[in-house]
Structures are given as structure tokens and as C-alpha cells.
Image (cartoon, rainbow, N blue to C red):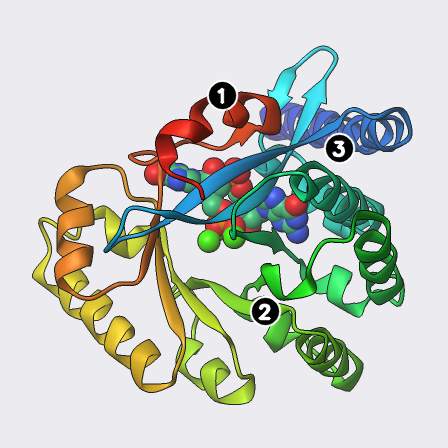
Amino acid sequence: AKAKGRGQLALFDRALDAKVQQRRRTEQDLRVALLEGGLRVHYQPVIDIATGRTTAYEALVRWDHPERGMLPPDEFLAIAEETGLIVPLGEFVIRQALTEMAGWKGNFRLSINLSPSQIRSVDLLPTIADALAATGFDPSRIEFEITEHVILQADSSATATLDRLRASGIKIALDDFGTGYSSLSYLRRFPFDRIKIDRSFVKDLTTSASSRAIVSTVIALGRSLGMQVTAEGIEDRAQLQILGELGCDEAQGYLILEPLAASELDRVRAGLGAD
Ligand code: C2E
Ligand code: CA
Ligand code: CA
Ligand code: CA
């Protein structure tokens, strides 16, 4: 039994080694991708539920990996965050999104996700200022999306950064609303322009009365605080219908369109009424 235990331990060690190695490999590959242009930005439209008009595009990072294909953020964002690579990655996304969207006609917002360490980075404000100057993009059309982790980990300098962004006309949205421990208290701590209701509440909107009650309450709450409300992860017509009835402002999800490269989006944009 002892020998067997040792054997299992060795096996466990090897599995751990493999995992550590895999992470190291991903980190190295990501450094190369950042230097050599292996990252992409995809865009997902957000619509006004009442009119169907496209009001925004959310920038979502992708990694065009030479061997593994187009990777979603789940595959590399945690490692990027741990290693600090999230800062240059985030700078790439800001520059690329503003550059790609600057030439597009229409009065849409551009939504960009910011992680906790990006907000803490001293490079964030200069990066944004440079990208605005280089592209001529109107700051009041930019909205940064942050989760409550950002607020949770925010020191006074992070809060000052958010205040500076808002002072320049940039909007701030609270992303993934409802998934954390004390979302409500965050609404008091920072004057968000928008609440994004997490997909998990939208998912069983048609089958669960409690999900419907929660979503309805969040919409009413947003309204009374003067915040817009966007629901994410809409996959079918029934969900969109209910959200409209509950008075939700905007919707985003595969039902409307999946995230696409700017070139692909250009081809379907005519049909979305983006003007
Ligand atoms: P998120 O900000 O909540 O973004 C929405 C996610 O839901 C996206 O996943 C999007 O592709 C997916 N989605 C959209 N509509 C539907 C739908 O109808 N059904 C389902 N099942 N999913 C839908 P994605 O692109 O894999 O991004 C995952 C997360 O990674 C994002 O969640 C965001 O937190 C983070 N992320 C993405 N891009 C960036 C970035 O440039 N910077 C930072 N810091 N984080 C990013
Ligand atoms: Ca988001
Ligand atoms: Ca979200
Ligand atoms: Ca999310």
C-alpha cells in the first residue's frame, strides 16, 4: 500500500509539473504574440431593445495561436493577469479597438473591458490619451467595463483613475452584475453609467420566476439610480421579449450576433441598421 501511495504521489508530481510547464509555455507564447502581432480584437454589437438599433460594440480579445487556433480569453487571461502581461495586452486592445473603430460611421459606443491590474497600472491613462490623440476617437463614445473585483481591489489611486476617466467624458459600466458577493454596495461606491446584467440571470429568464424577479429588480434599480441597463448573453427570442417587457434598455448576445473581427462585421453591419 505504501508503494502504491508513493506511485500515486509521483504521478501527482508529474501532473503538477506538466501543468506548471504548460503555464510557462503559454506565458512564453503570449510574450511572443504580443511582440509579433498574434492578438486580435473581435467585436460584438449591443442593441437598443426598443428600436433594434446598434448602440455599441464590445471589444473582446482573441489570440490567434499558431498551433492552437483562435483562443478565447478563458485560455490566457488568468495567466496574463498573474504575470502582468495583461497590461501590454490591454494596451494593445485599447489601441487596436480605437484604430479599427475610428473609421466606422454611426454614433455607437465602444466598450472595452478593464481588469484590476490594468486599473492599477500607471500606464493606463497615458495609453488612453495616446490612443485618443492618434485616432481622434471621441472619449464620450468610449465605455470601460469593470467587474466588482476592480472595485473590491481598488485603492485610492485606482479610484482616482476611474474619476479621471469619467472627467474626460469616458463612461464606466459595472460588468457581470449579480455574480459577486455584494454587488449592491458597489453601486453606492462608484457612479456607474451602466449596469450589465450577467448572462447567468438571462439564461433561465424564461423558466425561472426568481431570475425574472431579480432581473426586473435590477432594471428598476438601475433606472432609479439613473444608470442604463444592458443584459448580456441573449440566445433566444423569448429572452429578448421578456427583457423588453421588463424595460431593459439594451441587449447583447448570440441571438443578435456573435463577436466578429472588424472585417467580418463590416460585411454584416448593413443589416444591423448601425447608423
Ligand atoms: P464579458 O466581459 O462578460 O464578455 C462577454 C462574454 O460572453 C464574451 O466571452 C462573449 O463572447 C460571450 N457571449 C456573448 N454573447 C453570448 C451568448 O449569447 N451566449 C454565451 N454563452 N456567451 C456569450 P469572451 O469573448 O470569451 O470573453 C470572456 C471574458 O474575458 C469577458 O467576459 C471579459 O471578462 C474578459 N475579456 C475579454 N476581452 C478582454 C480584454 O480585452 N481585456 C480584459 N481585461 N478582459 C477581457
Ligand atoms: Ca464585458
Ligand atoms: Ca459581462
Ligand atoms: Ca464575464
Question: Which one is in front, 275 or 118?
Answer: 275
Regarding mark 2 in the picture, which secondary structure is present there?
strand
Mark 2 Cα shell of 10 Å, populated few (<14), some (14-19), many (≥20): many
Looking at numbered disc 3 in the image, what kind of residue is underneath it?
Arg
**Vertical side of 92 occupied by 107: above or below:** below
Mark 3 neighbour class, 10 Å CA radius: few under 14, some 14 to 19, many 20 or more: some
62 up-or-down from 125: above or below: above
Residue labelled with disc 1: 267
Residue 122 is left or right of residue 146, and the answer is right
| Quarter of the view holding residue 66 | top right
Determine the residue positioned at 43% across, 73% down.
181
Tell me what residue is drawn at x 20 percent, y 47 percent: 240
Q: Position of residue 90 (x, y in %)?
A: 75, 49
Q: State whether residue 145 is above or below residue 239.
A: below
On the image, the x and y values in percent for residue 113 come to: 61, 54
Residues tagged 3 and 1 counted as in contact (Cβ below 8 A): no
First in residue order: circle 3 vs circle 1: 3
| Towards the viewer: 274 or 257 | 274
Q: Earlier in the sequence, mark 1 or mark 2?
A: 2
The residue beneath circle 2 is 171
For label 3, the residue is 23
Quick check: marks 2 and 3 in contact, CB under 8 Å? Answer: no
Q: Residue at x 54, y 64 (%)?
A: 147
Q: Residues within 10 Å of mark 1 (few under 14, many from 20)?
A: few
User: Residue at point 76% right, 60% down?
Assistant: 118
- In the depicted view, which residue is nearer to us: 64 or 240? 240
